[in-house]
Image (tube, helix red, strand yellow):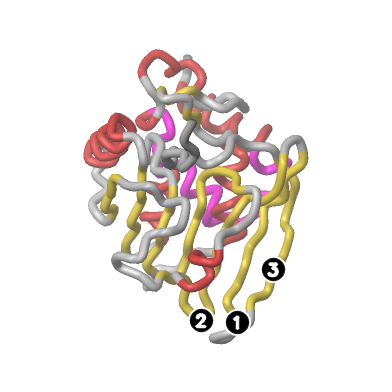
Amino acid sequence: MNIEQARFNMIEQQIRPWNVLDQEVLDLLLVVKREQFVPPAYANLAFVDTEIPLGGGETMFTPKLEARVMQEVMVRKHENVLEIGAGSGYMAALLAHKARHVTTVEILPELKAMAEKNLANAGVTNVTVEEGDGAEGFSRGGPFDVIVISGALEVLPEAFLKQVKVGGRIAAIIGQAPVMSAQIITRVSETAYDTVKVFETNVKYLKVAVKPSHFSF
């Protein structure tokens, strides 16, 4: 496989037609090598329009979804970013190239280790991978300029709204299958938020810790 041709085809045939027209984002996809973040068993799928399995029931977003989120959230160089759901580390790497620092939270220890290894191998140094349940956000290091939730939620927990700065943005996929809406929620003041639905999609729900049942039999 000619990797550079496959990467070019991914950008031109999948990503650009999906309304990703920001040249900085398209250029970023040439810089951050997606194949370095795909499990070796699925290397031949690195540029395919599919969700790649990572283990533990988790998958990578499709390339076009990753690129579209990057375009819509508009990360700037001085900003600190929180990502919920590190996965393979690829989304964190994309964010890191645009941001000052990224904190990414992963609930599965094996994926935390994978993300750390992939980021190190790719030479990305401004990402911290934390192990934890990010379903209610992650207060350490906050409030953040940008929060990206790499998994769907039925509703956005209140906690996230408190963890983003005024002027900051949350990228979240909200709703129930098969139709979920990707939303950018901007905190416009201490008490007000502006929500824009940017596209519809259907992705796996964010993995959360299973809380013990309080029922006794």
- Nearest to the observer: residue 211 or residue 151: 211
Distance of label 1 from label 2 (alpha carbons): 6 Å
Mark sitting earlier along the chain (1/2): 2
Q: Which residues are magenta?
A: 15-35
Labelled disc at residue 166: 2
Above or below, 164 against 4 in this view is below
In the rendered image, which residue does mark 1 sit on?
A: 188
| Main SS of residues in magenta | helix
Residue farthest to the front, as pictured: 217
Disc 1 marks which amino acid?
A: Val
- Nearest to the observer: residue 111 or residue 62: 111
Q: Are marks 1 and 2 in contact (CB under 8 Å)?
A: yes
Distance of label 3 from label 2 (alpha carbons): 14 Å
Q: Please rate how many residues cluster around mark 3, counting C-alpha atoms within 10 Å: few if below 14, some from 14 to 19, many from 20.
A: few
Residue at (62, 27) in percent of width and height: 49
Counting from the top left corner in percent of width and height, residue 83 is at 42, 53
Where residue 114 sits, quadrant-wise, is top left
Counting from the top left corner in percent of width and height, residue 6 is at 53, 25
- Nearest to the observer: residue 16 or residue 198: 198
Residue at (46, 77) in percent of width and height: 165
Labelled disc at residue 195: 3
Mark sitting earlier along the chain (3/1): 1
